[in-house]
Amino acid sequence: QVQPVESGGGLVQAGGSLRLSCVVSGSMFSINGMGWYRQAPGKQRELVAHITRGGHTNYADSAKGRFTISRDNAKNTVYLQMSSLKPGDTAVYYCNAEFQYSVTWGQGTQVTVSS
């Protein structure tokens, strides 16, 4: 089974940047789309960015202009480049892989933005 594994989280000051990576074990051929989500303490998990197999992207309003999602099929990896980070971006960031009948999630990576 394809399993996403996130990395790249950490502690960064407000205004800084981070790049998250999501490596998928196995081929990305059967994946319809991949997304980055985040969950802050006491809040529901929310979509941050999504990319389809064809490369079409969409973003949450909070991410537009600051975050960029991309994929490298040769490396079985999806990235989330985050810039101009704010304390409100602090959360656990999760990557998921969408198949025709199921979705698999990674374990998450913590992003903490200090003011």
Image (tube, rainbow, N blue to C red):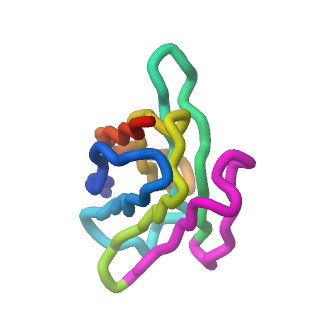
Residue 73 in picture, x, y percent from top left: 40, 80
Q: Position of residue 54 (x, y in %)?
A: 62, 78
Is residue 1 in sight in this rendering?
no
Give the quadrant of the C terminus: top left
Position in image of residue 81 (x %, y %): 47, 65
Q: Position of residue 15 (x, y in %)?
A: 49, 53
Magenta stretch encompasses residue 58: yes
User: In this view of the protein, which residue sits in the foreground, 47 or 26?
Assistant: 47
Q: Nearer the viewer, residue 76 or 83?
A: 83
Residue 92, image quadrant: top left
100 displayed left or right of 18: right
With respect to residue 39, does 103 lie above or below?
Answer: below
Image position of 115 with respect to 13: above or below: above
Number of on-image labels: 0
Asked if residue 79 lies in the magenta stretch, the reply is no
Q: Residue furthest front?
A: 115
Tell me the quarter of the image containing the N terminus.
Answer: bottom left
**Front in this rendered view, residue 73 or 6:** 6
Range of magenta residues: 53-73
Residue 98 in view (yes/no): yes
Q: Residue at x 56, y 67 (%)?
A: 68
The residue depicted at 61 percent of the width and 68 percent of the height is 52
Q: Is residue 55 above or below residue 46?
A: below
Among all residues in the image, which is located at the extreme bottom? 74
Q: Residue furthest top?
A: 42
Q: Foreground: 73 or 110? A: 110
Residue under the image location 61 percent in, 77 percent down: 55
